[in-house]
Amino acid sequence: MKTLINIIATLILSSGCLSIYAQQMPMYTHYMYNTLVVNPAYAGSRDALTVTGLNRSQWVGFEGAPTTQTLTIHAPLRNEHIGLGLAVVQDKIGPVRTSSVTGTFAYIMKLTPKAKLSLGLSAGINMFQANLNTLLLDQQSDPVFLNNIDGRITPDFGFGAYYAREKFYAGVSVPNLLQNSYSQVNDVNGNTLISREQRHYFFIAGTMLKLSDNLALKPTTLIKVTQGAPIQADLTAMFVIMNKFQLGAMFRSGDAAGGLFGFDITNQFHVGYAYDWSYALSSSKYNSGSHEIMLRYDFLLFDKRQIQNPRYF
């Protein structure tokens, strides 16, 4: 319980007057399939109306551990220069719950017959709720945990750029430009603490390397930067077998390592599972790792008989 309270305190008091900072946005092992949550310029990048659902259960067996659900929908318009999308995210850790609904717009430019550059904008709302007085504390009079934050709704905006070829992509983004404040309290020493969102910067990239007729290697990365926290990088390498099966490993700097498995049930329906273990957590011996399930379906648009096949990203 003390470990959970420390984690929550870091999240709540990040970016305060005492220079307490932390990463706040949820992490995803399937970031390469959950791209719209990270970069709004990804909207409409596939030749379909793409629906992706993801559920992450982190530190299973640890009371109050984070759980995250996301649902994204995006598609290009008929003129193929405009992409629209919607992302819904719910993240819960202990008594703290954050929900967001975000709309995305992307303008897609064809640089060459095989290369595109997209610029994206996002706008949405975040709802933050923290039932802090439900926690069992060593000091019940700690003013930081006396007051709840009930359903605080704030706006948010984001920006991103996404470059893609058939077998390569790269992007940069700032999905949360605003740094909204949720509350302000004084601690037992009289210091003012401000609960505020932190701005995050993302870089993503990936490529497909053909090894043989039925085997390819798909390395990808996500790098996350935010003030006052170490730069965190996800490195993933997946073997693609017969354009249907995917099997690989991941490493998250300073945090976790694990594996991924995916299967294309049809050309339109993909299922993925990932497991990672947080080697850096002092509480790692009290949990059985993190599990993630991802489903993605591509609905055909504009009388197309099939999606451009294969579609790597």
Image (cartoon, grey):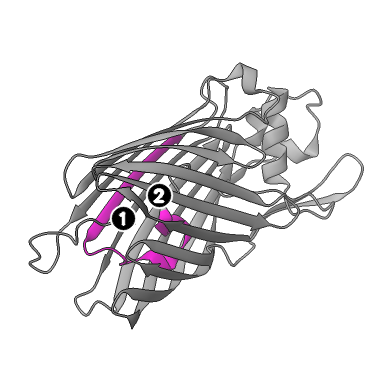
Few, some or many residues within 10 Å of mark 1 (<14, 14–19, 20+): some
The residue drawn where x is 59% and y is 41% is 252
- Distance from the alpha carbon under mark 2 to that under mark 1: 9 Å
Query: In this picture, is 186 found above or below 305?
Result: above
Report the front residue among 258 and 130. 258
Query: In this picture, is 68 found above or below 89?
Result: above
Residue 285, image x and y in percent? 63, 17
Few, some or many residues within 10 Å of mark 2 (<14, 14–19, 20+): many
Report the front residue among 159 and 238. 238
Residue 214, image x and y in percent? 25, 44
Q: Is residue 213 magenta?
A: no
**Residue 146 in sight from this viewpoint:** no
Residue 4, image x and y in percent? 66, 28
Which residue is the site of mark 2? 218
Which residue is the site of mark 1? 312
Going by the numbered disc 1, the residue's amino acid type is Tyr
Of mark 2 and mark 1, the one earlier in the sequence is: 2
Q: Magenta span covers which residues?
A: 35-56
The residue drawn where x is 22% and y is 64% is 47
Q: Is residue 51 magenta?
A: yes
Report the front residue among 223 and 114. 114
Q: Are marks 2 and 1 in contact (CB under 8 Å)?
A: yes
Q: Which quadrant of the view contains residue 187?
A: top right
